[in-house]
Amino acid sequence: MSEELDPFSIAQEQLDTAAQVMGLDEQAHAILREPMQTVQANIPVRMRDGKVRAFTGFRVLYNSARGPGKGGIRFHPQESLSTVKALAAWMTWKTALANIPLGGAKGGVICDTKSMDGSELESLSRSYIRSMGRFVGVDLDVPAPDVYTTPQIMAWMMDEHSKLVGSNDDFGMITGKPLEVWGSEGRFDATAQGGMDVLREAANYYKMSIKGSRIAIQGFGNAGSYAFELAQKLGAKVVAISDSRGGVYDPNGLDFARLKETKEKTGSVANYSGGEKITNEKLLELDADVLIPAALENQITGSNADRIKARLVLELANGPVTPEADSILLERGIPDLPDFLVNSGGVVVSYFEWVQNKAGYYWTQDEVYSRLSSIMSKSFADVVSTQLKYANSGKKISPRTAAYVIAVGRVAAAMKARGWY
Ligand code: GLU
């Protein structure tokens, strides 16, 4: 039988596994298997040829028991209701594991940003907010950037929303904004910073040295490119990198500045001169110490998990490893640290941005990074201690299931306290 690759079915399967391990109340389980609210909109945008085109957009509020919804908006040609529902579920577990007072949500638009110009993107962003205006807001559901959405897009969305609600203090309705309109210091590379905090903790725990270690990164977007730069600063050697058009491998290490320039000039890191051209699939199977999937879902599956050679997998993307691959890696003794732990730095600093916007009082970058680092270390410690607790009673569970047990436990407890079941 071929493996289930539908993202939302995967998210439900992961929840079911955790529910069984932790003996979750049946009613709580039933509530948590589906989103609380799903909005789909048909979004009209006038394109540069003068014609109006309708885009399909989504916003899913998965769970708000612990606070307003939180989660990014993706602009992607392969977006679907299933991906948005899965990502919204993962946001719920992400905010709960980080123990920040927010719930989980996600948005998306089916579109190809590469074929759109700036004014089309601005119109789409504003039109998205006009369609979703009643469902988002500082105390309702707070969006943020994700795949192919930027701080500029957040600023347009905030501007549109502030007109809609008639407020000049509506900054906290969205995070990941540019600093000029009260984004947070440190938000731009927060996902990668948080990932590196986890890497530091993990290296310590699994007794690996980061200095001199070989890292392969799949993806050169916000998360992947900053992870590259930060890993190098920690003394690691990034030996492989890729983007949607392909990748490059050099066992002696790649040069960040040259790679960035190649990407800017040619549109893809695959055109880097020197090193060996590789595919995205091959990159995953390289002989490296740490593998960082930082692109899209379903990259490590039942069909390639037995060929992964890395000693540690750090999921910086959302949903890169399927449940079947999760079990294979567990059996093979390769720790695979889950997305909603590893990449939670983005939402943690988004939370800081929201707090600063609500207070109207701003922190320094050092304050942001040091608070972020404490949260990341605590989340990592919680995950490994939960895994150990189960191991001591004879149950071998993956780091992902351990993280689920903590997160689901917290959301279920909040629902119970509110009288939802
Ligand atoms: N899009 C990021 C994520 O998947 C950040 C979400 C946020 O900042 O709300 O975690």
Image (cartoon, grey):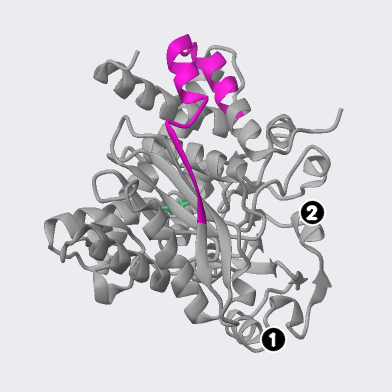
- Please name the residue shown 70% across and 46% down the image: 298
- Please name the residue shown 27% across and 15% down the image: 419
Nearest the eye: 269 or 292: 269
Question: Would residue 247 be seen by someone viewing this image from the given angle?
Answer: yes
Q: Gap in Å between the C-alphas at discs 1 and 2?
A: 26 Å
Say few, some or many: other residues with alpha carbon within 10 Å of mark 1 (under 14 / 14 to 19 / 20 or more): few
Q: In the image, is 370 to the left or to the right of 194?
A: left
Span of residues in magenta = 14-42
**What secondary structure is found at the residue carrying circle 2?**
loop
Quadrant of the frame with the C terminus: top left
Nearest the eye: 252 or 397: 397
Q: What percent of the width, then of the height, locates residue 208?
A: 58, 50
Q: What percent of the width, then of the height, locates residue 207?
A: 55, 45
Nearest the eye: 271 or 107: 107
Up the image or down, 243 lies above or below 372; here it is below
**Residue farthest along the right direction in this orientation:** 1
The numbered dot on residue 285 is: 2
- Please name the residue shown 54% across and 22% down the image: 18
* Amino acid type assigned to the residue bearing label 1 in the image: Thr
The numbered dot on residue 266 is: 1
The numbered dot on residue 219 is: none
Quarter where residue 326 is shown? top right
